Amino acid sequence: MWHVLCGDVAARQLSPLIKRNGSAQIKVLRDDLAVGPLQDVDMPPCAARAAFWQAVWPEEASAELDLGSLSSDVRWLQALPQQPYSVTVWHGDSASEQLMLARVAFWLGESPVSVQEVKCGTGESHTGGRRAVSMCAPAQLAAFVPQAVSMARRQQLAGHWSAQRASASVLRCWRAGQLLAGGYEVPDAALMAACDSAWRPLPAVMAAVMEAADGYFPTDYFVYWRARVLAAQGQVVIEGDAGKGYSGLRVRRPA
């Protein structure tokens, strides 16, 4: 059986449970599907998708960026219908996780491969109420009961993925059981609201944006990228030594 998860933290949480079953394997899909263009995400070499992540990733951390995984993930998904193992997808209140579930359903199509889902969320989208798989302890994950995904639901999920992949939107949120598409104006407005005319540590401003996000879990690098974009546009001013990342930077609105 394949256990499919979004992100390394979720995989670490689930790993103690999976090790008890020697035949089970974990597949980690690391791409944060909630942000960036999706039109070519299933078309290796995923040039537009790769260009997006190259822009997001700060130069000082470029060695950490594995763009090759974009194409390898597509090849793995394409092979799913022909392999003999069942698939279990773990997901919570995360747009990335919900999109991952829809993507897996799309590539499985009407194949005979059996699919289960493990719903780890609370059904909430707001900070304090929502829950991603990575937020669950191993004991908590062990208590969730897998549910079979019917062919009708698989087709519905596949349709969601097709629609999102065809859309020109660059931000996707999960609210009230629905995927809502939008643009970067959402995080940009939150970042601007967290700034004023006085200098503030950039990490504190970024944390405020991440904590207030509704419907998706923006990463620090994504918010840092939006801060750099706004600085290039003259909407905020950033100063400090970026050689060690954003930790030593501060930000304010222009005087």
Image: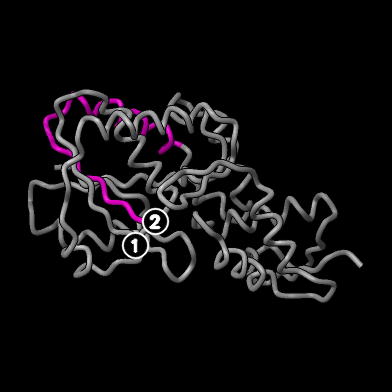
Q: Amino acid at mark 1?
A: Thr
Q: Is residue 84 magenta?
A: yes
Give the side of residue 67 with respect to residue 4, left or right: right
The kind of secondary structure the magenta stretch mainly shows is: helix
Dot 1: what SS? loop
Question: In percent of the image, x 56 and y 49: which residue is there?
Answer: 62
Dot 2: what SS? loop
Question: In percent of the image, x 56 and y 61: which residue is there?
Answer: 213
Q: Which mark is residue 93?
A: 2
Give the side of residue 148 with respect to residue 120, left or right: left
> 194 or 155: nearer the eye?
155
Q: Quadrant of the C terminus?
A: bottom right
> Image height check: is 75 above or below 133?
above
Q: Amino acid at mark 2?
A: Asp
Scheme of colours in the image: one colour
> Image height check: is 246 above or below 164?
below
Q: Which residues are magenta?
A: 68-92
Tag 1 and tag 2, C-beta contact below 8 Å: yes
Q: Quadrant of residue 99?
A: top left
